[in-house]
Image (cartoon, rainbow, N blue to C red):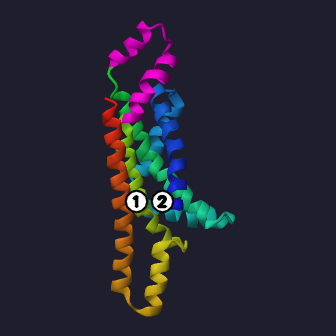
Amino acid sequence: IPLALISFAIALVIAIAVALVQYARVPVLTQLARFYIWIIRGTPLLVQLFIMYWGICNPLGINKWVACISALSLNVGAYSAETIRAAILSINKGQWEAGYSLGMSYQQTFRRIIIPQAATVSIPPLFNTFIGLVKDTSLASTIMIGEMFRKAQEAAASSLEYLWIYIEVALIYLLFCTLLTGLQKWIEKKLRVGK
């Protein structure tokens, strides 16, 4: 859970920056943002994790936790950037006109009207992304990070009870994801009440 929370927090910062760059259509930065999203969405997370750890961080002597958090954050950041960009684009143009008619500038309209509505639209898919990230943290075991799945592998190797230990891990992941899904539904219900 801490690995997922830290990675997701960093990913959100990346996602907001990339989404805003694409929305603003800053010439060179937009092309870089699109290239970043293309690379991340076109390659498996496991490959990205290996490149980050074995290709970049390990040769430089950087901690494997930093490598894992970096890979997870970059991966989730790319997907979340598209979610946020789509949420911004989904806001009706009449909202812009309403802001302008109230005498707001472009920045004020964007900050006070568009962003709050886009945030509401993007919360459910971002929560789904977070739930996926919780499960994806199991890939950290491939670079010897002592998270839950790695500990299960070690326990299974010493006890030779592979089936039961892996079923136990699956149930723990299922429990966490069920709780997070319940939280997501509660948040979505609260958001609907305001409409």
Q: Is residue 62 above or below residue 105?
A: below
Labelled pair 1, 2 in contact (Cβ < 8 Å): yes
Front one among 99 and 15: 99
Neighbour class for label 2 at 10 Å: few (<14), some, many (≥20)?
A: many
* Residue on which the image places disc 2: 48
* Image point (43%, 86%), residue name: 156
Tell me the distance, in whole angstroms, between the alpha carbons under discs 1 and 2.
Answer: 6 Å
Residue 43 makes an appearance in the image: no
Residue 121 in the image: state x and y as whole percent.
35, 35
Residue 40: x percent and y percent? 44, 51
Could you tell me what secondary structure mostly forms the magenta stretch? helix
Tell me which residue sits at (51%, 48%) in the image.
11
- Magenta stretch: give its range: 93-120
- Label 1 packing within 10 angstroms: few (<14), some (14-19), many (20+): few
Amino acid under disc 2: Gln
104 falls in the magenta region: yes
Q: To which residue does mark 1 refer?
A: 44
Q: Percent from the top left, x then y, of residue 150?
A: 49, 76
* Left or right of 75, for residue 54: right
Q: Secondary structure at mark 1?
A: loop
